[in-house]
Each structure stands twice: as C-alpha cells, then as structure tokens.
C-alpha cells in the first residue's frame, strides 16, 4: 500500500470508506479535520509521524481540511516524499485543485467520495453584488473564517457544474493566492463576488 493516499470529497464520507482500524482514534491512529491546515499543523504532523508506534506496526494519520496554506503544503513535501516506514497517511481534501501539483504527485489517488454541497455559495450568489460585498465586509469584521473557507471550497464545485471560462479563471486566481501568508481574503473574495453569476 502506498504510504500516502488522497481522497477527494466529504471528510465523513471519506472516513467511512476506510477500514475500521484506520478510522478509529487510538494511540496509533490520529483522525483530524481542520478548517484550514497551516504551517504549525504541518510541523506537528511531521513530528508525530516520526514517533514509534505504540501497539501496531504503523501509525495512521487521517488528515482532512477545507483549505490548506501553501506554506503547509511545501512543508509536507519532504514528509510524503521520504516518509517513515512506520507511518501511513490518508489525506482528505474537498477539491483536488486546492493542492499544489508537487504535493499531489506524492500522493496516491484513492477515490472521490460524496459531493461537496454548494449551499453557502448559492445563497451568497442569490444576492445583488452590493449585498455580496456587504456580507464579505461583515464576515471579515466578525472574523468568520468558517464562512470564508466554505465559500472558497464550494466555489470550485460551483464552477465545475457549468461555470464560464471567466468564472473559472476568477476562482482559480483566488485559490492560488488565498493561501499566501499576506493574502487578504476580503479583497480576494470581493474579486470573486464580482466575477461569479447566479445560475
């Protein structure tokens, strides 16, 4: 079995496809889903992966996220290229496109599971542009990172269901830069809000 497998889709549904022994938390099994997987999380995973298993032959890490920073992805490259022989990884991402090609190349594609809903982005797009911008400003003031992450994850699904070339470019642009440390989610979401149309 490949040391690091990639599952695309809903975290809970992906988890259900794994053997019970691989998804039941224990001393040697870690199951965690992050809203945003950052550099500190990557460092913690790397450190934990090098610990000796307590009861089993391997330590298993099931790691899911709605978003992952570029810094975190770069930090994981070495781990997945040359992992400890006592570690097995399952990476669950809502969309394959949010992963850097260099990281994807180190993961074995396992399966697509479930479907990411687009309820949040649909509700967002039913509003006039002025209302969209007002909601972004309000959510930013409240530091509602869960909403921002949901919009970003669902937008990729939304455009895959029939988006125009311009819409796809807008979403890909936002996904490319939103993970940068100095990125302004508010400004990037505003760009996307002006680019997407309701269907």
Image (cartoon, grey):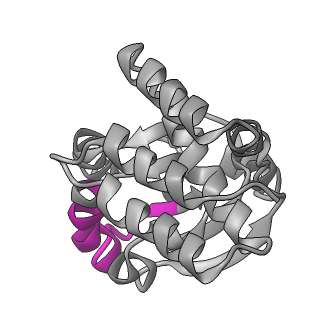
Q: Please state if 111 lies on the left or on the right of 76 as rendered.
A: right
Q: How many marks?
A: 0
**Identity of the residue drawn at 76% across and 36% down:** 123
**Identity of the residue drawn at 23% across and 66% down:** 74
Q: Please state if 121 lies on the left or on the right of 56 as rendered.
A: right
Please provide percent x and percent y for residue 20. 79, 47
Q: Is residue 36 visible?
A: yes
Find the residue positioned furthest to the bottom. 105
**Identity of the residue drawn at 22% across and 47% down:** 43
**Identity of the residue drawn at 56% across and 81% down:** 108
Q: Is residue 27 visible?
A: no
Q: Is residue 181 above or below residue 146?
A: below
Quarter holding residue 6: bottom right
Residue 41 located within the stretch drawn in magenta: no
Q: Quadrant of the N terminus?
A: bottom right
Find the residue positioned furthest to the top. 142
Quarter holding residue 38: top left
Please provide percent x and percent y for residue 152. 54, 50
Q: Nearer the viewer, residue 17 or 152?
A: 152
Q: Quadrant of the C terminus?
A: bottom right
Q: Which residues are magenta?
A: 72-89
Q: Nearer the viewer, residue 7 or 134?
A: 134
Q: Nearer the viewer, residue 44 or 72?
A: 72
Q: Please state if 159 lies on the left or on the right of 27 as rendered.
A: right
Please provide percent x and percent y for residue 67. 46, 49
Find the residue positioned furthest to the left. 182
Q: Nearer the viewer, residue 48 or 167?
A: 167
């Amino acid at each position: 079995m490949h040391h690091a497998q990639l599952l695309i889709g809903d975290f809970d549904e992906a988890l259900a496809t794994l053997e019970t022994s691989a998804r039941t938390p224990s001393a040697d099994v870690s199951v965690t889903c992050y809203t945003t997987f950052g550099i500190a999380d990557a460092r913690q995973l790397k450190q934990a992966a090098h610990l000796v298993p307590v009861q089993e032959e391997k330590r298993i890490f099931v790691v899911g996220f709605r978003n992952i920073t570029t810094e975190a992805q770069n930090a994981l490259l070495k781990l997945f290229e040359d992992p400890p022989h006592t570690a097995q990884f399952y990476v669950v991402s809502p969309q394959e496109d949010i992963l850097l090609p260099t990281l994807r190349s180190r993961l074995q594609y396992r399966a697509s599971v479930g479907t990411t809903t687009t309820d949040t982005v649909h509700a967002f797009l039913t509003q006039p542009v002025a209302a969209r911008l007002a909601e972004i400003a309000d959510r930013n003031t409240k530091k509602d990172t869960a909403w921002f992450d949901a919009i970003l994850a669902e937008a990729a699904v939304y455009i895959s269901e029939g988006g125009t070339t311009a819409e796809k470019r807008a979403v890909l642009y936002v996904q490319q830069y939103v993970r940068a440390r100095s990125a302004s989610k508010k400004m990037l979401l505003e760009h996307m809000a002006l680019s997407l149309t309701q269907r």
